[in-house]
Image (cartoon, coloured by chain):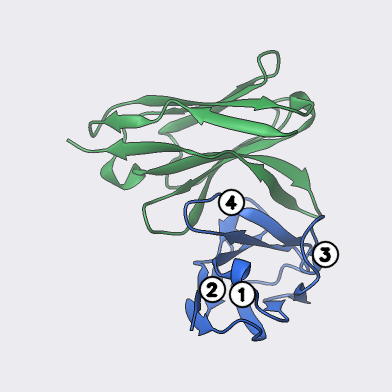
Amino acid sequence: DIQLTQSPSFLSASVGDRVTITCRASQGMSSYLAWYQQKPGKVPKLLIYAASTLQSGVPSRFSGSGSGTEFTLTISSLQPEDFATYYCQQLNSYPLTFGGGTKVEIK
Amino acid sequence: EVQLVESGGGLVKPGGSLRLSCAASGFTFSSYSMTWVRQAPGKGLEWVSFISGSSSYIYYADSLRGRVTISRDNVKNSLYLQMNSLRAEDTAIYYCARVIHCGGDCLDYWGQGTLVTVSS
């Protein structure tokens, strides 16, 4: 099974900050990675797939990069509605696995 | 509009059983693979099971294999998860999600979830 390790697990940031979240995979998986956003009490929302492709309707301040074993999610200018928990998910093989999550909170 | 509505959760004693359902609408259900994902209170996401559109391919998480059975009824546009021998650690919100091919398998629509609580 592919294990995903996200870092940091928690970050505190201000509106307007540039934020980067990292997801490391236990084995190489090309670009088979997605990112999800989950706000408190809400369901996860698909943000990015294939490591860098924005899902329809997702603001362009979100971007993804990486391949192999290291991936990043970047929010170029954090907005109030972006405070949430972010999860990476590997698409490479079953069992599907998720990272442990990164909670982004207001500084 | 794509809608996924789960039901069937509730309080069950350890060792008990539950059958979760997910009613789908707004898309051609039989054309999509579906999956169950769970989230324990205050914890992260854990994939549970996958079923292809024709039910030809079925996968389970190791932690649940042998205790759960996924199935679907493409006439009723419904997805199911039969859960047996439930344990306290199975307490979670169970989400059904639609699978799309995005290079691999991504989950583009999620239901609101149904809460399963396993407690004596």
Question: From mark 2 to mark 4, how far is it between C-alphas?
Answer: 16 Å
Q: How far apart in space, not on screen, are marks 1 and 2 (Cα)?
A: 6 Å
Residue at the (66%, 84%) spot, across then down: A16
Return the x and y of residue A46 as percentages of the image width and height.
69, 55
Discs 3, 1: same chain:
yes
Whichever of callouts 1 and 2 sits on the residue coming sooner in the sequence is 2
Three-letter residue code for mark 2 = Thr
Chain drawn green in the picture? B
Q: Are marks 1 and 2 in contact (CB under 8 Å)?
A: yes
Mark earlier in primary sequence (3, 2): 2
Q: Would you say the residues marked 3 and 1 are in contact, meaning their CB atoms lie under 8 Å apart?
A: no
Q: CA distance from mark 4 to mark 3?
A: 22 Å
Label 3, label 1: how far apart the Cα atoms are: 16 Å
Drawn side of residue B29 relative to residue A101, left or right = right
Q: Which mark is residue A53?
A: 3
Position of residue A96 measured from the top left corner of the image (x, y, whole percent): 61, 53
Q: Where is mark 2, residue-wise?
A: A5
In the rendered image, residue A87, in percent from the top left (x then y), is placed at 58, 64
SS at mark 4?
loop
